[in-house]
Amino acid sequence: MVTTGQGQVERRLVAILAADVAGYSRLTGLDEEGTHAQLQDHLHSLFDPKIDKHRGRIVKNTGDGLLAEFSSVVDAVRCAVEVQRGMAERNVAIPKDKRIEFRMGINVGDIIIDHGDIFGDGVNVAARLENLAEVGGICVSGAAYEQVRDKVPFAFTDRGEQRVKNITHPVHVYSLEDADGARRAPARPGITRLPARGLGRFRPKFRYVASGLAAAVLAVAIWFVNDTVRSLRWWNTASRLSLVVLPFTNLSGDPAQDYLADVITEELTTSLSRIRRSFVIARSTAFTYKGRAVDVKQIGRDLGVRYVLEGSEQQSGDRVRVSAQLIDAETGAHLWADQFDADRADLLEMQDEIVTRLSRALQLQLVEVEAARVARTHPSDLDAEDLAMRCEATLVHTQAGSDEEEQGYNLCYSALQRDERNVKALVNLSFKFINQVLTIQSQDREADIRRADELVSRALSIDPNAYAAHHAKALVLLTQKRFEEAVVEAERCLALSPSFVNAYGDLSIASSYLGRPQKAIEYADKAMRLSPRDPFLYVFQFQKGFALALLHQDEQAIEWLRRAVAGAPQWPLAQALLAAALAESGQETEARDMLKRYLSLNGTRARTITQWKAQMPSDNPMFLSYAERIAEGLRKAGLPE
C-alpha cells in the first residue's frame, strides 16, 4: 500500500472510466481466438491513443475491457465519446454477429492508489455505471454530470437515482447513448435523443432483439439495513416490476455449451434494463448466483426485487428446448412458466427467437401480474402509474370493441388527471382514437386523427425513446396516409424493443396500404411465429387475411378472417370484411348472417356503403381495386347504400 510521509494512505480525486465488451461470452463462444485478437487490436489502436490524447492513464485491462483514470472529467467524457464513435466506424464493415461493442461508465471520486492500481467507491460506481449503459453507450454519475454539463456539447438523458450493488447511497445516472447525434444539441438534463446514426445503430442482431422485452418490467431496487423489519419493508416499498434474471442453466451436460445459456441471460437482462422507469439487477450481480442453489425469497430481500426470472436450456441435435419461470420473490409462488423448442440451424436467428419470445411473453405477464397486485394491495390509493398500468392490462386482455375496453380507456383518463405527463396513459389513450379511424368506424375522422396525434406527440416529447409511443406514432401516420413514414416509425419501435411484435403488425398493414401484400403476409407471419399465443393474435390473423384478399386468394383470406372473428367476436372490422369476402365468393347466405352480426355490434358506426367509402385508408391503385370489391361484397350481403 502506498502511503504518504505521515503513514497515511495515498488518495486523490480523479475521473474514472470503466469499459467492457457487451456480449463478450457470446463472442468468445463463437470464436475465442478471433474475438481476443479483435479486442486487442481495438485496445491498442483506438483506446490507447485516445486515452493518451486526452491525458488519461490506463490503470489495467480487465479481460473484456479496461479501467482508466483522468485528471479531468471533461477529458474522460470526450475520450469516451471519441472511442465510441471510432468503434461505430470500425464496425460498419463487420458482420453484426462479430462486432465488438463497448459499454462505458464514468464517475468522479476520491480513490485509493496502491502500486499503480486504484480502489474505492469511486471506482466501484464507475463499474456499476458501465453495467447500466446501453450497448455502444455511456453512463455518467451525477457528480460527473455536474462537472461537464456546461462544458461539452452533448445531450444527456436523466435516468434518475438508481440503487447499485455494494454502494450505500443511490447513484444519480445520466446516459449519453448517441455520441454522434449529441454534437447537434446542447447538453441539458432530461433531454433524450433517439439514435439516428452513429453509435445506436451498430449493434448485433440478437442484441437488438433482446433490447426489447418487452414492455414489461421493473424498477428501482430498495435496500434497507434494519434486518428485523427488512422483509416487510423492502416488499412494501420496492418499485413496480423490479426483477432479476438469474443465469439460465445449461442442462445438456456439456460445459462447452454454457455460452448459449449465458447469452440468453445477458440478452434478457439488457432488454429489460431498457424499459422506461425500470431497473433490472445488473448481469454482473446476477451471474454471482450461477451454479448455486438459490432461495428466491432471500434473493428478493438481498436485491430488493419483487420478481425473479429463472430458466434453462437443453440442446439435443438440431433442437434447443428453453424453459423459463417467473417467481414471486415475496411468496416463492410460480406466477408464469413457458417452454418451447427452437431450431439450431441458424444460431443467430435461434437466439433472436428465444429472447424475443421470452421477452414478449414476460412483458405481457408482468403487466397483468403487477396490475393485479396493485388492485389487491391498495385499490383505494392508486397513483397515475398504477392507473396507467391497469389501463394497459385491461386493454391487452380484453376484446376489441367490448365494454371492458372502454373501461380501460377510462383508467387512462383518470391517470392523466393525476399526471398529465404519464407516457403510458398518453399512449394507450391514443389507441382509442386511432382504432376508430383504422377500423373504418370513426364518426369524425379528422378530429380523431388530431386527438391521437396530439396524445402521441406529447408522449414522444416527454420520452423520445418510448417504444410504444413510436408504435402509436406509426399508427397515426397510417391514418394520415403517410405510409412510408409509418414504416420508419415501426422500425424505430422495433429497434428500441424488438420483442414488441405489435410493430410487425404496423409493418404488415402499411405494406398492404402500399400495395405490397406479399410483404404484409411476411410481417404478419413473423408476428405470429414470435408470439403464437399473443393477446393480439387476432389482429395479425386479420392482417394476413386482408393481404391475401388483396392478392385475390379469397379462399385463404376467408380462412384467416374467420380466425380473426373467432378471436375477437366484438370487433367490427373483421366481421365486415369477412361478410364481403363471403359474398364475393358466392356464400351469400353466410355473408348476410355475418353482416347482421356486424350491424348488431356496439362498436359499429359505418352502416352504409357511402360511410365505408368515405373512410378508405389508402389511395394505392391495388388497394382501391380491393376497396371496390369490399363495397360490392357488402352490397351483396345487404348493407344499404
Image (tube, grey):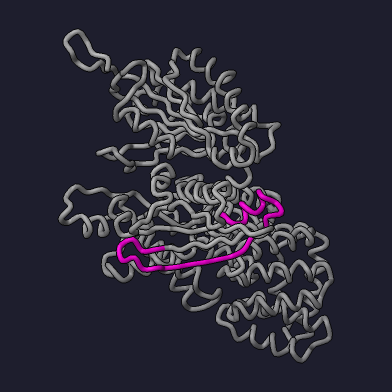
In the image shown, does 248 or 402 lie closer to the viewer?
248
Q: In the visual, does 104 lie left or right of 588?
A: left
Q: In the visual, does 439 lie left or right of 300?
A: right
Q: Residue most toward the bottom?
A: 589
Is 561 above or below relative to 51? below
Is 371 above or below relative to 53? below
Residue occupying the point 65% across, 58% down: 504
Res. 542 visible in picture: yes
Res. 450 visible in picture: no
Q: In the visual, does 175 lie left or right of 257?
A: left
Question: Magenta stretch: residue 349 in it?
Answer: yes
Is 122 above or below relative to 167? above
Question: Magenta stretch: residue 431 in it?
Answer: no
Q: Residue most toward the front?
A: 253
Residue occupying the point 50% across, 12% down: 53
Which quadrant of the figure has residue 7?
Answer: top left
Which quadrant of the figure has residue 316?
Answer: bottom right
Is 153 above or below relative to 335? above
In the image shown, does 597 or 71 lie closer to the viewer?
71
